[in-house]
Image: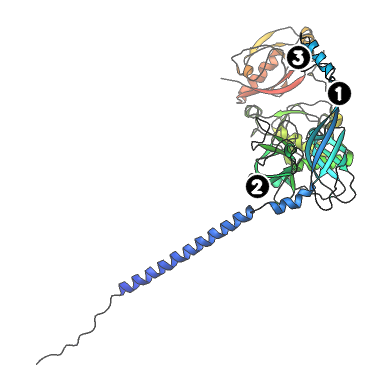
Amino acid sequence: MRRLVTRRPPVQPKARSISVARDNRMTNARLMALALLTLVFVLVQTLMAAARPESLAPLAERISPAVVNITTSTLIEGRSGPQGIVPEGSPFEDFFRDFQDRNGGDNRPRRSSALGSGFVISEDGYIVTNNHVIAEADEILIEFFPGDGQPSKDLPAKVIGTDEKTDIALLKVEAEGPLKYVKFGNSDTMRVGDWVIAMGNPLGQGFSVSAGIVSARNRALSGSYDDYIQTDAAINRGNSGGPLFNMEGEVIGVNTAILSPNGGSIGIGFSMASNVVTKVVDQLRKYGETRRGWLGVRIQDVTEDMAEAMGLAKASGALISDVPDGPAKEAGLKAGDVIVNFDGAEVSDTRDLVRRVGETEVGKSVRVVVQRDGSTQTVLVTLGRREDAERSETGGGSGDEQSEPEAVEKQFLGLTVSMLTDEMRNELGLADDAAGLVVTDVDETSEAFEKGLRGGDVITEAGQQKVSTLADFEARIDEAREAGRKSLLLLVRRGGEPRFVALGLGN
């Protein structure tokens, strides 16, 4: 008997179906990732386009009417002879004098002209520029950007006030109608890499615009109140006094100087920061002069070895080297104090302190925090006015009166020192009651010589304590070594000018 067998259709393997589904999902994921990357790329391009507009023309058109050209004229007395052509006493002197006489001479007064830039800060005609643009000028003419509503002719300007320390001047013109003007921005918000625009009258070519970025911040050139923005926007002669704008059309600097080996722009220009300029302009506008705060101390930076010698946690603050008569002395500040905080703000160095004091209102009582004898103290000081205090200051040391000591010398830390005698006081031009130790010789291979100590210097303090005898000096050295110090801080006077020097104690 034959058995019938029913055959089932073969079962398809599930593995292949799963593999196909996985491939589909991976393909979809790749497509989604590609789409996401494309979207990110588009967004980045959009943001870059927003960060740097395709054209600066709309911004330039909006702010340019407030930028002005400045022409100054100065009457110069003529020369009475051929100075500057041949040396005085030269055998050619008579020849050149005759030549000048035959050609009308060179002794008649003549006018010299100079060009610069500026910008209007109010509709009633106040204009900011550099002091050096208008210094000693007999006549100042302002040329406005051509346009509707702008003065069609040059207007004479009068000087409201100047400040040589920041090289800022404030002028005023009388126009028939309101003038277009620009506002100051906050220079402290500018970052290295931000876009800026410089406008002015370079090389007498008329209104010109250049663009660049902020290359650096807080640059100092030569003044106590310097706070320059460095930029690579083209700045040339004639741009002085012109504005440096941010992308909002606000003035964040006044173009003042360039660094150049040939007199032309090489991409290193300096603009005085607007947060300095606004304070100066406000005072010039109100008083016709500046009124800066005055603390009344001589200060120097704290070096690493000084900080170690004084037991400070870090080398920062401003070390007081002398306290002449003035607000600080009346308040109780002392030489050797380290100012670490002024009016609620930390002090990083001497430049920082000078700026903060100068920007503080005259007559204001401020809290000054100092490090003294290993502890922190707060002193309340009422500021005076710096302009009133800029006079000759008396120097010289001071100390306890003593009987005439015997002249004895001894060597310490590469120095040969001696107690002061009346003869030495006369030779060094010191006061009769001046106390301290005089340096008679310095080992040229020593650290003391490297740090500038020389014969004739007078040491009035060691380890922040007065010294008047050789025993005092030796005791200060021993105390510093016992305390584990590596350096000893000396207060040294030369020609009445004090300064601190830290010398290593060695082994």
In the rendered view, how is the structure colored? rainbow
**Where is the C terminus found, in terms of image quarters?**
top right
Tag 3: amino acid: Val
**What x and y, as percent, mark residue 28?**
43, 68
Mark 3, secondary structure of its residue: loop
Which is in the foreground here, disc 1 or disc 2?
A: 1
Task: Tell me the residue that label 3 is attached to.
Answer: 86
Give the camera-side residue of 28 and 395: 28
Q: Quick check: 202 above or below 408?
A: below
- Disc 1 + disc 2, Cβ < 8 Å: no
Residue that numbered label 2 is attached to = 194
Q: Three-letter amino acid code at disc 2?
A: Asp
> Is 366 situated above or below 91?
below
Q: Cα distance, mark 3 to mark 2?
A: 52 Å
Answer whether labels 3 and 2 touch (C-beta < 8 Å). no
Location of residue 504 with respect to 148 vertically, above or below: above
Residue 237 visible (yes or no) = yes
**Which residue is most to the left?**
1
Q: Judging from the image, what secondary structure is the residue with disc 2 in?
A: loop
* Amino acid bearing label 1: Glu
Q: Nearer the viewer, residue 15 or 334?
A: 15
Label 2 CA crowd tier, 10 Å (few <14, some 14–19, many 20+): some
Q: Say if 228 sits above or below 46 in the image.
A: above
